[in-house]
Amino acid sequence: HYLNGEFARRCETNTSYSLRSFAKALNVDAGTLSRVLNGKQALSYKMAKKIVGSLDLSPDQQKEFFNSLFHYQQSRKLEKVHKQNIDEKEYKGQDLNIDYYRVIADWYHLALMEMTYLKSFKPDSRYLSQQLGITQAEAKLALERLINLGLLSKKNGKIIKTNEKLSTIDRHLTTPALIKNQKQFLEKAIQSLENDSIEMRSNTNMTMAIDSTKIETAKKMIREFQMTLCNFLESGKQNQVYNLSVALYPLQKKREE
């Protein structure tokens, strides 16, 4: 039911979106996915693991997904999924703190942490709500969440950012959160394109025919450029929080050899 709903949602936002596109995004075979969505084939545990890794589900949603799979297969007497494997072995790490997941996934947590460097910063939910365009409830919970996780701390009556860094090394846990985070920042870029003056933003793109064997080197160069630019921009008077997004992606459906 969830997969059918997600497929329908993507089709609504992109009229050219197809089942083959959905299968590619989930890293599964299109024919198999079609049979699963039509109820003609049970979803295997191996395929479910692939799918969950490609969707922006929270840890609780992932566990719910696998529990529903367990009960479905049990009702069909397929016994391909063992509940012990889901709850105790394979997804032992899924006890990832939901607050930590939210920090990685929801863009305004990162923005709030950076705002602590601003002279005008106030740890007030109304102020944060106005500055970030979020609700006061979201602002209040985000501030409390960051303090509870030790990513912000109170010192001499002020809220400061600690030296702790968010870990995104464990892809099994953080990939869904990072996917959600990237989507949010892409949406923010579109909003900026439509609402901010050209003096306040930079939106550029370049289309090129490339040697795809150089992608890994290109990604390294992008990371180095980002850090160089970050150091340059942060070295002056910090008076506003910005986001830098660089996207490099293929336009062709198939690669020529």
Image (cartoon, rainbow, N blue to C red):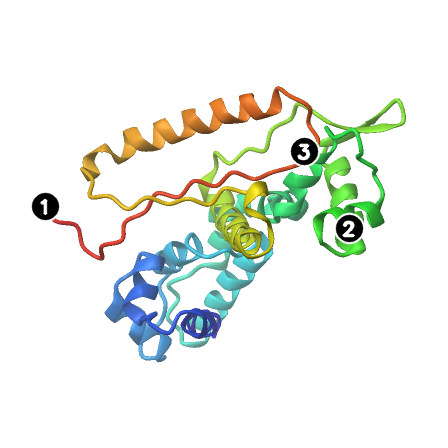
At 64% from the left and 39% from the top, the residue drawn is: 110
* Residue with the most extreme left position: 257
Amino acid under disc 1: Glu
Residue under label 3, please give it.
Answer: 114
**Helix or strand or loop: what does disc 2 sit on?**
helix
Relative image position of residue 210 (x, y in whole percent): 20, 40
Relative horizontal placement of residue 137, taking residue 53 as reference (left or right): right
Residue 30 got which mark?
A: none
Judged by depth in the image, the label closer to the viewer, 3 or 2, is 2
At 39% from the left and 60% from the top, the residue drawn is: 48
Relative horizontal placement of residue 243, taking residue 27 as reference (left or right): right
Relative image position of residue 101 (x, y in whole percent): 61, 46
Image marks 1 and 2: residues in contact by CB distance under 8 Å: no
Judged by depth in the image, the label closer to the viewer, 1 or 2, is 2
* Residue with the most extreme top position: 235
Amino acid under disc 3: Glu
Amino acid under disc 2: Gln
Residue under label 2, please give it.
Answer: 130
Residue under label 1, please give it.
Answer: 257
Label 1 to label 3, Cα distance in Å?
Answer: 44 Å
**Helix or strand or loop: what does disc 1 sit on?**
loop
